[in-house]
Image (tube, coloured by chain):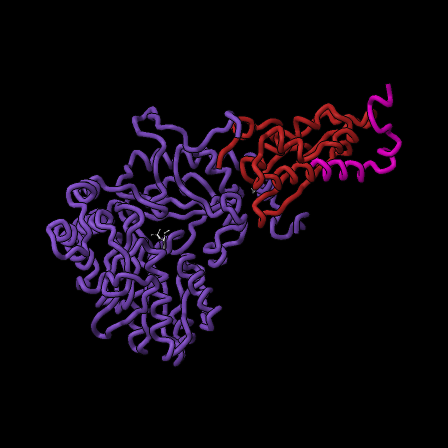
Chain colours: A red, B purple
Amino acid sequence: MSYSDKVLDHYSNPRNVGSLDKSSQDVGTGLVGAPECGDVMKLQIKVNPQTSVIEDAKFKTFGCGSAIASSSLATEWVKGKTVEEALQIKNTEIVKELSLPPVKIHCSVLAEDAIRAAIHDWKKKNNGVAQNVPATTEARQ
Amino acid sequence: MSTDVKTIPQEQHIAPNGIKLPIYMDNHATTPMDPRVLEEMLPYFMEKFGNAASRNHSFGWAAEEGVETARERIAKLVGATTKEIIFTSGATESDNLAIKGVAEMYKEKGNHIITAVTEHKAVLDTCKRLEKYGYRVTYLPVQKDGLVDLDDLKRAMDDKTILVTIMAANNEIGVLQPWTEIGKLCRERGIIFHTDATQAVGKVPVDVNKQNIDVMSISAHKMYGPKGVGALYVRRKNPRVQISPIIDGGGHERGMRSGTLNVPGIVGLGKACAIATEEMPKESCHLAGLRNRLRDKIMGRLDEVYINGTMEHRLPGNLNISFAYVEGESLLMGINDIAVSSGSACTSATLEPSYVLKALGTGDDLAHSSIRFGLGRFNTEAEVDYVADRVVETVQRLRELSPLYEMAKEGVDLKSVKWAAE
Ligand SMILES: Cc1ncc(COP(=O)(O)O)c(C=O)c1O
Ligand code: FES
């Protein structure tokens, strides 16, 4: 198996490793995958309740190097975006950025799922509130 | 792909403590050639290039002499006679020839074959094909320690059973099946016993007579010989075993395997066997010592590390362990200056974890976390120490990255979690 320099870089220096307080109202947690399948990703976001901008993101991943790199990249990409913008992130963009080979596409799918799951969790916690927030920051300006 | 792709392992370099990197510790996949083997082979490429089947000139005789010396050396290592050794292209062919050859030859007598679920694919897929031709195959399960239960074997035997094919040593977990006992059970019932001894020959003592082995597969490249050459032992007396050929042609190898012999390869296999005969006792102690050192250094510093398969009946150079909460491929990536292999799905083309580990009842999660260390003749204590350090470091780092490790530390029972992917 060959790895692109970007995968190797994220693997060796993963960004945003760690955990946020999952009981906090502002934090959304996504836990996807299963140990039996060899991959589990936990991705957490901390969302500003006023602007719905993702101010912080953390991850932990059990999986191959490409899965680690995909989730590390995902945390980089969601930071600074609003939740609605973050929902637009596609696994294909991750594949492209990391030059993942076909057998590793599912690792990027998992990262996309993790983003969605984290946002879903945050929205669930803040149901009424979330809907009152304008969809994008641009819309507020 | 573009130039920003690196292949692993990278080019050779020297570690601070003077050991050469990358370190090869995957000796179940293949072994490096012993230089003494190469030296013995070299004349047979150029000066002694003859066809061993050319009976009427000196070129042929020289080649034939090389082949016959090799036959003697192999026979000596396993307690056979020279007429019982058939040369093949390797253990895959030997397994095919043994199983298909016996199945066809004895089809009047019965159509039942017994094997085990942890066999190499060369055996399993051969058996699967025979099922299509109307044979009945029993795939014995293994116990948690990786060994077949002899009572299961006895129960599976019936009056239609013509062949039991159970490996000597497993290529993933290195466990040694109770082959002597299996041989005895087969002999008592007049059933032919074939054993795929690819990983065992040259590593542990074998005696085809004491162990009642009727047919046995051997491969050169697992014992410091060249690739693409192997042998099949076929018993000639007490009882005489016959096999139908699967390759027809010029009638070489007593008609059991046609095709011009790979003389240099065969000479290499012979030399590899001669070295093993001499050095096995010392070498196996040395390897077991290194293996245990590796195990102790790893297990002394990491918790939740599990050995797959029994330690009691095992190849001296094998260690197969699962590092809970860490996925195998990511671990391999972290120790990319060390060549080992993993049972993780992420490293396999099929994205299925090792069927051998699954058969032990190791949970799939632990199969994904497994690493196979295969120590060999040329590994040193300094290498073992380096490998242990790198593995421990990398596992610790990856556990810090693992959501499962975090959950386990928080006291979450991972088995009770409802995983989204299920
Ligand atoms: C147990 C066992 N059987 C058969 C084989 C196939 O051997 P060869 O590579 O010589 O065809 C191997 C090697 O992978 C093996 O480990
Ligand atoms: S997590 Fe298994 S291939 Fe990426």
Count of residue discs = 0
User: From where the camera sits, is residue B140 visible?
Assistant: no
Q: Is residue B2 left or right of residue B184?
A: right
For this orientation, the residue located farthest to the top is A141
Residue B377 position within the rendered picture, expressed as x and y whole percent measured from the top left: 26, 43
- Percent of width and height locating residue A95: 62, 33
In the image, is residue B114 above or below residue B171?
A: below
Relative to B288, A46 lies left or right: right
Q: Quadrant of residue B88?
A: bottom left
**What is the residue that sits farthest to the left in this orientation?**
B58
- Give the percent coordinates (x, y) of residue B62: 13, 50
Which residue occupies 82% across, 23% down? A137
Residue at point 31% right, 26% down? B17
Q: Which residues are magenta?
A: A115-141
* Residue A80 place in picture, x, y as percent: 73, 23
Give ligand 2's quarter of the image.
top right
- Front-most of residues B139 and B60: B60
Please identify the residue farthest to the bottom as the structure is shown: B159
> Does residue A78 lie above or below B131 as drawn?
above
**Res A86 seen here:** yes
B178 vs B186, nearest the viewer: B186
Q: Is residue A79 above or below residue B316?
A: above
Q: Name the quadrant containing residue B403.
A: top right
**A130 in magenta:** yes
Q: Main secondary structure of the magenta part?
A: helix
Q: Nearer the viewer, residue A26 or B52?
A: B52
Was residue B187 drawn as part of the magenta stretch in this picture? no
